[in-house]
Image (cartoon, rainbow, N blue to C red):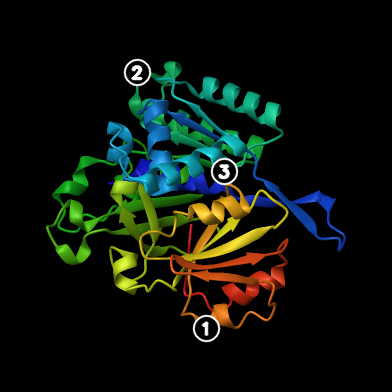
Amino acid sequence: MGKTTFAMNLCENAALSDVDDPNDLDENGIPKKKPAKPVLIFSLEMPRDQIMMRMLASLSRVDQTKIRTGQLHDDEDWAKLSTTISILQDRKNIFIDDSSGLTPTEVRSRARRVYKENGGLSLIMVDYLQLMRAPAFSDNRTLEIAEISRSLKALAKELQVPVVALSQLNRSLEQRADKRPVNSDLRESGSIEQDADLIMFIYRDEVYNDNPEHKGIAEIIIGKQRNGPIGKVRLTFQGQFSRFDNYTGGGDWMEQNKMSKANLCAIYRSPRKDGMFLYVAKRDQFDAVPEALMQQFGKPQFVMLFNLVGEKPLKRAKNKDVLQAIEQQGFYLQMPPPSENLLKVFLAERTQTYR
């Protein structure tokens, strides 16, 4: 259904985001950005190399089958992978523990150690809860799961860090006409429902029904939210990339939007003092920076991708120094060390922001 993929996407976003540093202010007294604190992943089901393979596919948007089999014959795929690996190496803030059969005490001890060594954590993820064990309650599976659930809740409160714990569901929902899960479908214990602050389920109709209209569409069902409303959110599921994306009205947002060459715009951070530059690429090539640009700006770091309404936002740029050249390969704009106002010129009329 995609629970590991969804949780890994949460971990990726937490690890690769930037946060305000209140101890480091610029000349205007505004906090500068710094990398987020580390993410700790307890993968009891999958080995760490498979987790990393999925992460590379998700962040680079390269088919995970190509990565797994080594069939990377496309220079663009190599460029995407290289950029992604560079970003992960620069961050060094994702820790993966793939030990099997961990106890609550072991999870708590290891989380405390990583927390202390790194000055905090952004997120802890456990995949999945039923593979943990609590020896003192091994005679009663329901009590064992209840103890594991309580221990993870206590860990979140102790470290003041969100803990995402994946859980299996009961097979009983397979017998229902509507197979969308509800809170009572959580396997082996009602204590999970009681302890959780937020419960999310994934439902993909294509798993049960051969309906092309629903292919690539996922529902995230909010079954419980202690401090907010419940409901449903649609996402686009891209299994080949092991990721969920914003839903834009269909399974493939590229096809649905019929994007022209001037619609997709990527922002890259330059390692030089130039700051950032924008590159508006041809369809399906928005992650591949031309060699000419790499020579001019140095090996860039991907920041974000968004969809422009058209070419007008580019032409409205008031700062003539911003517009450096227009190539047949695509538009690109150099920006001096970027101010927020300058970015707003380009982001003000975006229709959708990705990644």
Q: Earlier in the sequence, mark 3 or mark 1?
A: 3
* 251 is higher (above) or lower (below) than 66: below
Q: On the image, which quarter does residue 156 sit in?
A: top right
**Residue 268 or residue 111, whichever sits in front:** 268
Label 1 CA crowd tier, 10 Å (few <14, some 14–19, many 20+): few
Q: CA distance from mark 2 to mark 3?
A: 38 Å
Q: Is residue 166 visible?
A: no
From the top left corner, tell me how far across and down residue 283 is, in percent.
36, 65
Residue in front for this viewpoint, 350 or 262: 262
Given the image, on which type of amino acid does mark 3 rest? Ala
Q: Mark 2 against mark 1, which lies toward the viewer?
A: 1
Q: Which disc is residue 139 wearing?
A: 2
Residue 94 placement: quadrant: top right
Percent position of residue 233, x then y: 39, 64
Tag 1: amino acid? Lys
Residue assigned mark 1: 312
Relative to 129, 177 lies left or right: left
Task: Please tell me whether mark 3 sits on a helix, a strand or a loop.
Answer: helix
Give the residue at mark 3.
Answer: 15
Q: Marks 2 and 1, how far apart in space?
A: 68 Å
| Label 3: how many Cα within 10 Å (few below 14, some 14–19, many 20+) | many
Q: Is the residue under label 1 in contact with that under label 2 (CB below 8 Å)?
A: no
Does label 2 or label 1 sit earlier along the sequence? Answer: 2
Tell whether label 1 touches label 3 (CB within 8 Å).
no
Give the residue displayed 36% in from the left and 58% down from the top: 221
| Residue type marked 2 | Asp
Q: Residue at the left extreme?
A: 210
